[in-house]
Image: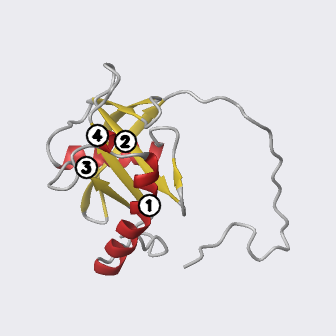
Amino acid sequence: FYAIVEPQKNYRDMADHSAGDLIAWSPVVRQRLNEKYAFVHPENPGIDRLSHILWTGAPTDSLADARNAVFYGDKAIDRSPCGTGTSARMAQLHAKGKLGTGDEFVHESIIGSLFKGRVEKEVTVAGKPAIIPSIGGWARMTGLNTIFIDDRDPFAHGFVVK
């Protein structure tokens, strides 16, 4: 789950704050929201907490509709606009009536990279309105990795630390 921080009384725009500020505040925001609210995916109860903080702002690129900084982990900000973050933002804007089916949304990251999203379809998930988004962008190969699964490993397909 994402917390999307929009302009409000004590937060006008991400451009007013350093990346260090956002990194310092995000764990506190996440902890307080997780303490106050229950976040549980309606079809996968293993997804049961808010994990990311998406700080919003006005775009600096004329091609973009909005700008963001996505905090994740313990102290990281995504260099991209973040695919799941862009999907969450489009779902939020769609729910507010600001983005319709078929509409495109260009999202700018904290360092200026762009993703182009589109609301492809409206659906329901466990009786709740949702969207199917598509995301496009670019990436560069920065390394190669070989991953294999040992069938004897009881955690071969992952685990969640709570």
Q: Nearer the viewer, residue 156 or 127?
A: 156
Secondary structure of residue under mark 2: strand
Residue 68 disc label? 2
Residue 97 shows in this picture? yes
First along the sequence among labels 2 and 1:
1
Residue 57 spot, x, y in % from top left: 28, 40
Asked if disc 4 and disc 3 are in contact, CB closer than 8 Å, the reply is: no
Residue type of the residue flagged with mark 3: Gln
Residue type of the residue flagged with mark 2: Asn
Binning the other alpha carbons within 10 Å of mark 3 as few (below 14), some (14 to 19) or many (20 upward) gives: some
Q: Residue 141: which quarter of the image?
A: top right
Which marked residue is nearer to the observer: mark 1 or mark 3? 1
Which marked residue is nearer to the observer: mark 3 or mark 2? 2
Going by the image, does 150 lie left or right of 119? right
First along the sequence among labels 3 and 2:
2
**Whole-number angstrom distance, CA of label 4 to CA of label 3:** 15 Å
First along the sequence among labels 4 and 2:
4
**Whole-number angstrom distance, CA of label 3 to CA of label 2:** 14 Å
Binning the other alpha carbons within 10 Å of mark 1 as few (below 14), some (14 to 19) or many (20 upward) gives: some
